[in-house]
Image (cartoon, coloured by chain):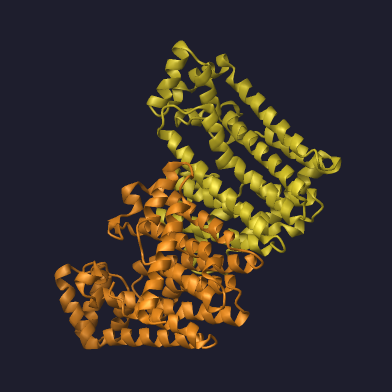
Chain colours: A orange, B yellow
């Protein structure tokens, strides 16, 4: 297959996932619960997690059709985390629309999150046959880690000293564990061997870490038009990203003083973004981030060496797309 | 077995459940997530839901030991609903202590609820063997209904006209579906037949409805010292309980006007409680509630006619205890 074929395969499968998701809450009552649920499920999104499920099922010799419900389930789980995280972060916008708790209220958003999670399990169960226990265990483990990761993330907001190692543990739990889980359940539902499940799980874990560092990098280096958000938002909010913590560990003198101010004051003003970007440039942390992304992507690709050359190609395309994305 | 034996069996098993629950979150990190989690899991409670799981396992010929983790799981699920409901209701106290969101904050409480639910699935999976899919499906169905029931309950707060039939649907989902689920998964884990699982599920469902109406009745008729809360709290808060809606459907003239005022003003003053209790007395709604409780309890007992006489006795004791409880 050529790159264009992968792109069209992705588009086709994304549409199928969207169709399942937009049908999932129809004909359910009460509407006070399921209308807001549909609002978030129909708000778009890349649907990368469902894609990981489907591709992993196919990579081990299974069919997409063995994993569509599971693919929808991981997207519901993802949306559950978005809805609850947005309440905690007091976020106003998500995917260009009002966040659920802003459009409705906090109580509705809490309950909609809970119900999305419950229906995620319902959908996952639809695809479970002989190996239900393994599939649901992997899903549950991913869920537990997401909660732990979110808790660490919240802790870090109030802490003055966070190490890069702690940051990596946090994104491993908050972001990468879910990608790992998606690949694992896809491989399990596709009938993969123990070795294949482990290999694809490691692919997901490493590509998930690369994805998150790329997210941090895009925030400061993206093309504003394509990015869709203002550049430097993480610095304005005082977020302890990979770039910020790397810069802090490398800096001395005046640079370090300026970086420590971001922590003390819990963020910077918009007109200070450029001067901080210069510090990042001088310290070379953008290149450090690019190198980390490459290194985790390499690890991800290495872990699926057990797959056939043909099956590896689509993961290679996926990894490349994630690294070269602009938003 | 005699009644004293049942009481001591309940006490023994309650302690075992408490031990599992207080160990469940130990040695997990981050403590910012699991310390508040332990705060709610160690705050006491009747542990009736775990008891339903254990007794149902035994009633079909299984052992308690086949279902301890599942018993802990349903209590975690119950605590997850308490933590999230308390945020939505803006409640200050729970089991005589500060609610979790008051002791910590809303974000912590949202996340602790989520994580209790995730660990509930982890514990449930520990007891799953051949029939994981059925067990987890029953658990998930119960969870979905609890969310729907909570949503209906919230809807009813703002609605002026709620019928008794709607109220019964709400408590079926919010309270009784979980009792049904507890009995079902206990019976499944104990190796029950399809008929036994269904029978015990119906026992749980009907006893759950009886339990909730009893809760409404206790609020206005309990001995204040034993009850531990002020009598008439539901009227003060303007809650649309079984008693209130039954009174509304039966009343005419001045009584009806006074009852409608409770809805309009979203509650009454403490010094009005007695005059409303008199309306309830005159309309005979306390007796109506007692009759409903008896009727649902009878249905519950009838549904387990398939069990042996010996096994029915402990459910009879349980049903009697729930009806004659004072708090």
Quadrant for the C terminus of chain B, please: top right
* Res B217 quadrant in image: top right
* Res A41 quadrant in image: bottom left
Quadrant for the N terminus of chain B, please: top right
| Residue B270 shows in this picture | yes
In the figure, A235 relative to B70: above or below?
A: below
- Residue B190: x, y in percent? 76, 55
| Residue A162 shows in this picture | no
In the figure, B157 relative to A225: above or below?
A: above
- Residue B243: x, y in percent? 55, 25
Q: Residue furthest left?
A: A271
- Residue B317: x, y in percent? 77, 38
In-image side of A142 versus B323 (left or right): left
Give the camera-side residue of B24 and A188.
A188
- Residue A194: x, y in percent? 62, 79
Give the camera-side residue of A142 and A247.
A142
Give the camera-side residue of B218 and A41.
A41
At 31% from the left and 50% from the top, the residue drawn is: A102
In-image side of B300 versus B244 (left or right): right
Give the camera-side residue of B87 and A220.
A220
In-image side of B224 versus A272 (left or right): right
At 53% from the left and 85% from the top, the residue drawn is: A307
At 85% from the left and 40% from the top, the residue drawn is: B309
């Amino acid at each position: 297959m050529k790159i264009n074929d992968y792109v069209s395969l992705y588009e086709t499968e994304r549409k199928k996932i969207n169709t399942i998701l937009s049908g999932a809450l129809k004909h359910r009552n009460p509407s006070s619960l399921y209308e807001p649920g549909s609002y978030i499920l129909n708000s778009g999104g890349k649907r990368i997690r469902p894609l990981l499920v489907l591709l992993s099922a196919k990579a081990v010799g299974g069919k997409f059709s063995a994993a569509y419900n599971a693919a929808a389930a991981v997207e519901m789980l993802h949306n559950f985390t978005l809805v609850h995280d947005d309440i905690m972060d007091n976020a106003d916008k998500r995917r260009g629309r009002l966040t659920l708790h802003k459009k409705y209220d906090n109580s509705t958003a809490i309950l909609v999150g809970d119900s999305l999670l419950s229906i995620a399990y319902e959908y996952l169960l639809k695809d479970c046959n002989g190996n239900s226990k393994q599939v649901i265990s992997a899903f549950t483990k991913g869920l537990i880690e997401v909660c732990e990761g979110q808790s660490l993330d919240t802790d870090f907001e109030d802490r003055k000293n966070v190490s890069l190692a702690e940051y990596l543990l946090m994104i491993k739990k908050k972001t990468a564990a879910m990608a790992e889980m998606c690949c694992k359940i896809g491989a399990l539902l596709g009938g993969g061997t123990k070795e294949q499940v482990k290999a694809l799980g490691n692919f997901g874990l490493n590509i998930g870490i690369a994805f998150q560092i790329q997210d941090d990098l895009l925030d400061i280096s993206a093309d504003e038009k394509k990015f869709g958000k203002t550049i430097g938002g993480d610095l304005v909010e005082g977020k302890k990203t990979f770039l910020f913590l790397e810069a802090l560990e490398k800096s001395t003198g005046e640079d370090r003083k300026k970086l420590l101010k971001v922590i003390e004051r819990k963020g910077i003003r918009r007109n200070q973004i450029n001067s901080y970007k210069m510090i990042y440039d001088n310290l070379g942390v953008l290149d450090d981030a690019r190198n980390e992304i490459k290194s985790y992507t390499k690890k991800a690709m290495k872990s699926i060496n057990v797959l056939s050359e043909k099956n590896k190609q689509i993961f290679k395309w996926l990894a490349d797309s994630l690294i070269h994305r602009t938003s």
